[in-house]
Image (spheres, rainbow, N blue to C red):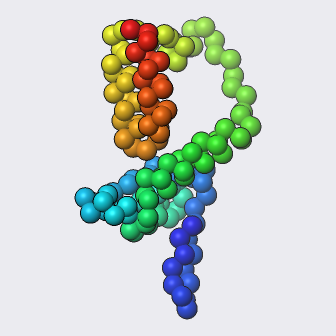
Amino acid sequence: MSVQGVINKHVSDSALEKVNDVVLEQSALGRILGYGNVEIITGSDIGANLFHRIAQPVRFKTMMLNQKSELVRSQPQQPTPTPTPQTAPPALAEEEPTPQNIPELIRKLDALRQQGVLTEEEFQAKKAELLERL
């Protein structure tokens, strides 16, 4: 929710389930002083909400994405039709990581950590788990 103005108010808000992407921009000075710009891109008519110079933008982005994932998890799932054997996709999520693709998986996890999606602790735990499989 964005609220602007003291005498004349302008309030803009977007539903959390409509959030498609979050873009974070921080200058070097912003990183030192702990502020930055966060743009929330939604599927609504507004399209995007831009918050200028907010405090702790990485924490804001992480908390917002965590809340969205909680919202998605708490919603009842629609029953999915059982695929026929001819159209069933391979079970990629169920495959065990091979020694050849573990470095790539660690790079992807690191990218998620740098984006603020994963915490440092989550990244280190998953990385250790993958390295044990080598």
Q: Residue placed at 59% from the left, 42% from the top?
A: 69
Above or below — where is 82 with respect to 33?
above
The answer to which of 79 and 61 lies nearer the viewer is: 61
Quadrant assignment, res 99: top left
Question: Can see residue 116?
Answer: yes
- In the rendered image, residue 28, in percent from the top left (x then y), is placed at 25, 58
Above or below — where is 63 with respect to 27?
above
- In the rendered image, residue 81, in percent from the top left (x then y), is placed at 69, 22
Numbered-mark total: 0
* The furthest residue to the left: 28
Q: Residue placed at 69% from the left, 26% from the top?
A: 80
Q: Residue placed at 68% from the left, 17% from the top?
A: 82
Q: Quadrant of the N terminus?
A: bottom right
Q: Is residue 75 left or right of residue 13?
A: right
The answer to which of 106 and 32 lies nearer the viewer is: 32
Quadrant assignment, res 74: top right
